[in-house]
Image: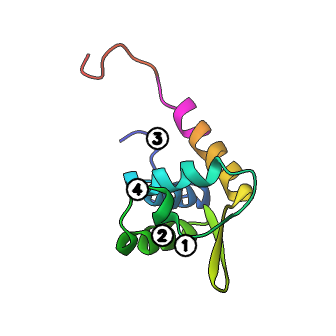
Amino acid sequence: MDNYINKDYTIDNEQLARFAKAMGHPARITILQFLASMDSCYFGDIHNELPIAKATVSQHLKELKNAGLIQGEIETPKVKYCINRENWKKAQAFFDVFFKNCKEKTSCCH
C-alpha cells in the first residue's frame, strides 16, 4: 500500500469530491457554463435559455447549489442565479492541485 493513501479523508478532498460530484452531469456543466458567461446574476428560467427540460432544471440547480457552486434567490416572480465566485475559486484551486499532483508516465502498465 502506498504511504500517501490514508483511510481518513481531508476536508479539502471531501470538498473536491462534492464539487466533482455536482459537476458530474452534462446538464450541470451546461448550467455552470451559462451562468459563468454572465456579467451579473441571471434572472429568469434557465430552461428557456438552455437545451434542458424544465422538469430536470430544478434538480440540477439544487445539486449545484448544495455543492456551493451557485447561489440562487427567489425574487418573485423570478429566481436569481449566480456563480458562487468564492467557491468557484476554491473548486479551481482544488482541481488544479489534484491534476498537478498526478504523476506523468508514458504508460500506467509498465
Distance between mark 2 and mark 4 Cα atoms? 11 Å
- Please report contact status of discs 3 and 1: CB closer than 8 Å, yes or no: no
Residue under the point 51% across and 56% down: 31
C-alpha gap between disc 3 and disc 1: 33 Å
The disc placed on residue 66 is: 1
Mark 1 lies on a secondary structure that is helix
Of mark 1 and mark 4, the one earlier in the sequence is 4
Q: Is residue 76 above or below residue 54?
A: below
Q: Which residue is mark 2?
A: 63
Q: Position of residue 79 (x, y in %)?
A: 63, 76
Residue 87, given in percent of the width and then of the height, sits at 68, 58
| Whole-number angstrom distance, CA of label 2 to CA of label 3 | 34 Å
Residue type, mark 1 in image: Asn
Cα gap from disc 3 to disc 4, whole angstroms = 38 Å
The label number, if any, that marks residue 3 in the structure image? 3
Look at the picture and state if 48 lies above or below 80: above
- Choose the circle earlier in sequence order: 3 or 1: 3
Contact (Cβ within 8 Å) of mark 3 with mark 4: no
